[in-house]
Amino acid sequence: MPESIAPQSYRRGVIYLVLAGVFMSTSGMLVRMIDQADPWTVLFYRSITFAITVLLFMLIRSGKSAFAEFRGFGWLEWIVAFSVGFSFICYLLSLFNTAVANTVIIISSGPLFAAVLGWFVLKEVVSIRTWISIVLAVSGMFVMFTADVSTGDILGMVYALLAVAAFAVMIVAVRRSTRPDMLAATCCAGLVAATFSAFMMPSWALSTHDLLIAIGLGSFQIGVGFILITLGSRSVPSAQVPILCLLETALAPLWVWLTINETPGSTTILGGALVLSAVIFQGVTGIQRRRKENLVV
């Protein structure tokens, strides 16, 4: 993190990340508005739209030189592309198979699992505070999984865990990369998810209503949301990013409660409180540690 980040730049980064949480939080609400489209068909059009959205942003930012970012892809870039693509698939399938609250709460634990994978692969030191956060998060998910949930809920929560695992792989690959960002790789992730979905979808056809929602999921929800996270992360310390993005976890169940009347159960609320406490504890202690090291936050 550079030591000379202007306060205005930091504030702009915070605004970007807060807005990212708002955009990302609309996923569950939009999925619940789908009439009859098969999940794989929605995934295909969502993934294609996401890839186009990211590519357009790259072209606006860098012009024709954006295409140069796709050259020289190594194994790290392809790991990011495939892990993000796999995460896209699992995330949406989770929303189709369990309550939105279950999905977003499990997804919010991603940074903690990334820390564990970084410990194994990159030999990064995991502090006692992080281990405490991990224990809290795992306890919260154990409470959620042992609740009186249906088979469909369990399947959806497993999909969410797979998405978290893929997210952790992506984070570790990004840390090892020397590229300034991985926008080109994430653009390819949309194509990876679309290609896999094309083999699974029963039909290319879907109603205009469902097509518009799929396009909204790819552009408005994850496309703009991901771009805002990329922009915000430039001027906000990494320890603060998960906390600011927690707005997604808080808002997603609220939107479906207001629009679809999908209310989280008491066990989900209890387990979710443990998971969110873990992520907040990890983020706050990370900020305190940076301040002790005299880094500008």
Image (cartoon, helix red, strand yellow):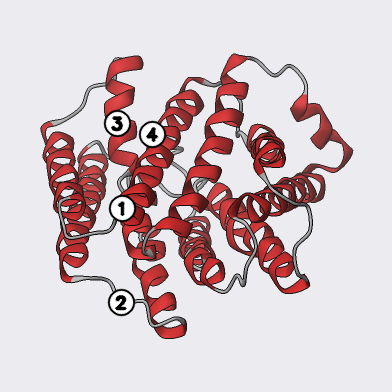
Disc 2 vs disc 4: Cβ atoms closer than 8 Å? no
Q: Secondary structure at mark 1?
A: helix
Type of amino acid under label 4:
Ala
Q: Nearer the viewer, residue 99 or 62?
A: 99
Which residue, given by chain and number where applicable, does mark 4 sit on? 165
Q: Nearer the viewer, mark 2 or mark 1?
A: 1
Which residue, given by chain and number where applicable, does mark 1 sit on? 151
Q: Secondary structure at mark 3?
A: helix
Query: Counting residues from the N terminus, which is met first, the one under dot 2 or under dot 4?
Result: 4
Disc 3 vs disc 4: Cβ atoms closer than 8 Å? no
Whether residue 188 is situated above or below residue 52 in the rendered picture: above
Q: Nearer the viewer, residue 62 or 256?
A: 256
Asked whether residue 235 appears in the rendered view, the answer is yes
Q: Nearer the viewer, mark 1 or mark 3?
A: 1
Label 2 to label 3, Cα distance in Å? 32 Å
Q: Secondary structure at mark 2?
A: loop
Which residue, given by chain and number where applicable, does mark 3 sit on? 115
Which residue, given by chain and number where applicable, does mark 2 sit on? 263
